[in-house]
Amino acid sequence: LERKAVDAVFVCTSDNWHDVIAIAALQKGKAVYLEKPMMQRLEQGLDIVRAQKATNGILQVGSQVVSSI
């Protein structure tokens, strides 16, 4: 996340890490793509949305196969 050459982060880890990684990436100014599911608990999703709104960052949630061409 410290590398300036990195513009975006794909979060494809187990879903228990999605909120931690997505929020950290958004706070560092990176665009974030989250694999489904976005989170395990509703509060985690709300934290991600709050981070996106606070940073005005780019956030997309989806399935790689469905979201790709």
Image (cartoon, helix red, strand yellow):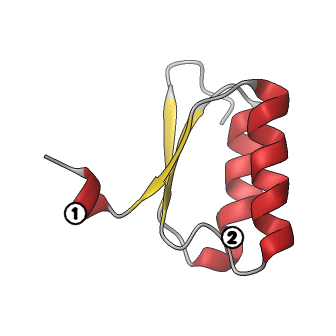
Task: Note whether 25 is above or below 37 in the view shown.
Answer: above
The count of marks equals 2
| Residue at 84% in and 44% down | 50
Classify residue 57 as left or right of residue 48. left
Classify residue 4 as left or right of residue 12. right
Task: Give the labeled residue for mark 2.
Answer: 17
Task: Note whether 24 is above or below 57 in the view shown.
Answer: below
Q: Amino acid at mark 2?
A: Trp
Q: Residues within 10 Å of mark 2 (few under 14, many from 20)?
A: some
Q: Between 3 and 27, which is closer to the camera in this rendering?
A: 27
Q: Amino acid at mark 1?
A: Val
Task: Note whether 47 is above or below 51 in the view shown.
Answer: below
| Residue at 74% in and 37% down | 52
Q: Nearer the viewer, mark 1 or mark 2?
A: 1
Task: Note whether 22 is above or below 41 in the view shown.
Answer: above
Q: Residues within 10 Å of mark 1 (few under 14, many from 20)?
A: few
- Residue 5 x %, y %: 50, 20
- Identify the secondary structure beneath mark 2: helix
- Residue 21 x %, y %: 69, 55
Q: Between 1 and 32, which is closer to the camera in this rendering?
A: 32
N-terminal-most mark, 1 or 2? 2
| Residue at 69% in and 30% down | 2
Task: Give the labeled residue for mark 1.
Answer: 65
- Residue 65 x %, y %: 22, 63
The quadrant in which residue 38 appears is bottom right
- Residue 45 x %, y %: 75, 63
